[in-house]
Image: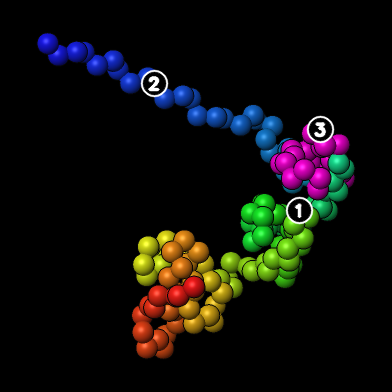
Amino acid sequence: MPVPLAPYPTPPTPFTPPSNAGTQSQLVCSGCRNLLLYPVGATSVCCAVCNAVTAVPPPGTEMAQLVCGGCHTLLMYIRGATSVQCSCCHTVNLAMEANQVAHVNCGNCRMLLMYQYGARSVKCAVCNFVTSVGVATSTAEQKFNS
Protein backbone atom coordinates (compact mmCIF):
# COMPACT_ATOMS: atom_id res chain seq x y z
CA MET A 1 0.00 0.00 0.00
CA PRO A 2 1.52 3.37 -0.99
CA VAL A 3 2.33 5.81 1.75
CA PRO A 4 1.05 9.38 1.15
CA LEU A 5 3.80 11.97 0.97
CA ALA A 6 3.55 15.05 3.13
CA PRO A 7 3.58 18.33 1.22
CA TYR A 8 6.79 20.29 1.24
CA PRO A 9 6.83 23.07 3.83
CA THR A 10 6.32 26.55 2.47
CA PRO A 11 9.57 28.46 1.97
CA PRO A 12 10.34 31.14 4.54
CA THR A 13 9.49 34.73 3.73
CA PRO A 14 12.55 36.53 2.29
CA PHE A 15 14.20 39.11 4.54
CA THR A 16 13.05 42.65 3.86
CA PRO A 17 15.37 45.34 5.18
CA PRO A 18 13.79 48.05 7.32
CA SER A 19 12.60 51.16 5.53
CA ASN A 20 15.34 53.27 7.14
CA ALA A 21 18.11 51.10 5.60
CA GLY A 22 19.22 54.06 3.48
CA THR A 23 20.20 55.98 6.59
CA GLN A 24 22.73 53.36 7.74
CA SER A 25 26.09 52.25 6.43
CA GLN A 26 28.48 49.47 7.36
CA LEU A 27 32.16 48.87 8.04
CA VAL A 28 34.37 46.15 9.51
CA CYS A 29 35.37 46.46 13.18
CA SER A 30 39.08 47.21 13.54
CA GLY A 31 39.25 44.91 16.57
CA CYS A 32 37.26 41.72 16.01
CA ARG A 33 36.49 42.06 12.26
CA ASN A 34 32.70 41.87 12.77
CA LEU A 35 30.48 43.84 10.42
CA LEU A 36 29.19 46.99 12.10
CA LEU A 37 26.13 49.03 11.10
CA TYR A 38 26.15 52.72 11.93
CA PRO A 39 24.02 55.78 11.20
CA VAL A 40 25.15 57.99 8.34
CA GLY A 41 27.01 60.99 9.73
CA ALA A 42 28.76 59.16 12.57
CA THR A 43 32.51 59.77 12.84
CA SER A 44 33.35 56.59 14.79
CA VAL A 45 31.65 53.36 15.86
CA CYS A 46 32.15 51.42 19.10
CA CYS A 47 31.83 47.65 18.64
CA ALA A 48 29.38 45.99 21.04
CA VAL A 49 31.40 42.75 20.96
CA CYS A 50 34.99 43.88 21.63
CA ASN A 51 34.52 47.61 22.49
CA ALA A 52 37.05 48.67 19.84
CA VAL A 53 36.41 52.10 18.36
CA THR A 54 36.63 52.18 14.56
CA ALA A 55 36.91 55.46 12.67
CA VAL A 56 34.34 55.99 9.92
CA PRO A 57 35.82 57.05 6.56
CA PRO A 58 34.81 60.56 5.42
CA PRO A 59 31.54 60.82 3.47
CA GLY A 60 31.91 60.09 -0.23
CA THR A 61 34.90 57.78 0.31
CA GLU A 62 34.51 54.72 -1.90
CA MET A 63 35.36 51.49 -0.15
CA ALA A 64 36.38 48.15 -1.65
CA GLN A 65 36.81 44.65 -0.23
CA LEU A 66 39.21 41.77 -0.68
CA VAL A 67 39.90 38.46 1.03
CA CYS A 68 43.29 38.24 2.75
CA GLY A 69 45.60 35.75 1.04
CA GLY A 70 47.10 34.73 4.38
CA CYS A 71 44.14 34.11 6.71
CA HIS A 72 41.08 34.53 4.42
CA THR A 73 39.68 37.42 6.47
CA LEU A 74 37.46 39.90 4.62
CA LEU A 75 39.29 43.23 4.44
CA MET A 76 37.76 46.61 3.61
CA TYR A 77 39.94 49.40 2.27
CA ILE A 78 39.68 52.75 0.54
CA ARG A 79 39.28 52.24 -3.21
CA GLY A 80 42.43 53.15 -5.10
CA ALA A 81 44.88 51.70 -2.56
CA THR A 82 47.58 49.54 -4.16
CA SER A 83 48.12 47.27 -1.14
CA VAL A 84 46.31 46.41 2.08
CA GLN A 85 47.93 44.96 5.22
CA CYS A 86 45.76 42.51 7.16
CA SER A 87 45.36 43.47 10.80
CA CYS A 88 44.98 39.80 11.78
CA CYS A 89 47.99 38.07 10.15
CA HIS A 90 49.88 41.15 8.84
CA THR A 91 50.00 39.80 5.27
CA VAL A 92 50.37 42.57 2.69
CA ASN A 93 47.75 41.97 -0.02
CA LEU A 94 47.82 43.53 -3.48
CA ALA A 95 44.64 45.49 -4.12
CA MET A 96 43.75 45.48 -7.80
CA GLU A 97 40.92 47.35 -9.43
CA ALA A 98 38.37 45.41 -11.47
CA ASN A 99 39.95 46.67 -14.71
CA GLN A 100 43.35 45.21 -13.74
CA VAL A 101 42.20 41.59 -13.50
CA ALA A 102 40.75 39.04 -15.88
CA HIS A 103 39.04 35.68 -15.49
CA VAL A 104 39.54 32.25 -17.05
CA ASN A 105 38.25 28.76 -16.27
CA CYS A 106 40.82 26.23 -15.10
CA GLY A 107 41.77 23.90 -17.95
CA ASN A 108 41.38 20.89 -15.67
CA CYS A 109 38.63 21.37 -13.06
CA ARG A 110 36.83 24.34 -14.71
CA MET A 111 37.09 26.48 -11.51
CA LEU A 112 36.80 30.18 -12.32
CA LEU A 113 40.24 31.75 -11.82
CA MET A 114 41.20 35.43 -11.54
CA TYR A 115 44.55 36.73 -12.74
CA GLN A 116 46.32 40.01 -13.39
CA TYR A 117 46.30 41.34 -16.95
CA GLY A 118 49.58 40.57 -18.67
CA ALA A 119 50.09 37.22 -16.93
CA ARG A 120 51.03 34.32 -19.21
CA SER A 121 49.52 31.61 -17.01
CA VAL A 122 47.56 31.08 -13.81
CA LYS A 123 47.81 28.17 -11.38
CA CYS A 124 44.59 26.75 -9.94
CA ALA A 125 44.63 26.63 -6.14
CA VAL A 126 42.20 23.70 -6.17
CA CYS A 127 43.91 21.20 -8.50
CA ASN A 128 47.35 22.85 -9.12
CA PHE A 129 46.76 22.85 -12.89
CA VAL A 130 48.47 25.68 -14.78
CA THR A 131 46.28 27.26 -17.45
CA SER A 132 48.01 29.36 -20.09
CA VAL A 133 46.42 32.72 -20.86
CA GLY A 134 47.22 35.40 -23.39
CA VAL A 135 47.23 35.56 -27.16
CA ALA A 136 50.52 33.81 -28.02
CA THR A 137 50.50 30.44 -26.28
CA SER A 138 52.22 27.39 -27.71
CA THR A 139 50.52 24.92 -25.36
CA ALA A 140 47.07 25.38 -23.94
CA GLU A 141 47.70 23.93 -20.49
CA GLN A 142 50.31 21.98 -18.61
CA LYS A 143 50.27 20.09 -15.34
CA PHE A 144 52.27 21.81 -12.61
CA ASN A 145 54.35 19.28 -10.68
CA SER A 146 54.75 20.32 -7.08
Q: Which residue is mark 1?
A: 88
Question: Is 115 placed left or right of 42 in the picture?
Answer: left
Q: Identity of the amino acid at label 3? A: Ala
Earlier sequence position, callout 2 versus callout 1: 2
- On screen, residue 117 versus residue 133, left or right, reads right
Residue 81 in view in this figure? yes
Q: CA distance from mark 2 to mark 1?
A: 42 Å
First-in-chain label (1 vs 3): 3
10 Å neighbourhood of mark 1: few (<14), some, or many (≥20)? some
Calculate the distance from the C-alpha at mark 1 to the C-alpha at mark 3: 19 Å
The image position of residue 32, as x and y in percent, is 77, 43
Range drawn in magenta: 30-51
Q: Which residue is mark 2?
A: 10
Q: Tell me if mark 3 has few (under 14), some (14-19) or many (20+) residues whose alpha carbon lies within 10 angstroms of its own.
A: few
In the picture shown, does residue 124 fall above or below 27?
Answer: below
Q: Is residue 32 above or below residue 129?
A: above
Question: In the depicted view, which residue is nearer to us: 100 or 31?
Answer: 31
- Identify the image quadrant of residue 47: top right
Q: Which residue is mark 3?
A: 48
Q: Residue 21 placed where, x, y %?
A: 67, 35
Magenta includes 39?
Answer: yes
Q: Which mark is residue 101?
A: none
Q: Which residue sits at x=45%, y=82%?
A: 134
Instruction: State yes or no: discs 2 and 3 in contact (Cβ < 8 Å).
Output: no
Mark 2 against mark 1, which lies toward the viewer?
A: 1
| Residue 42 in view | no
Amino acid under disc 2? Thr
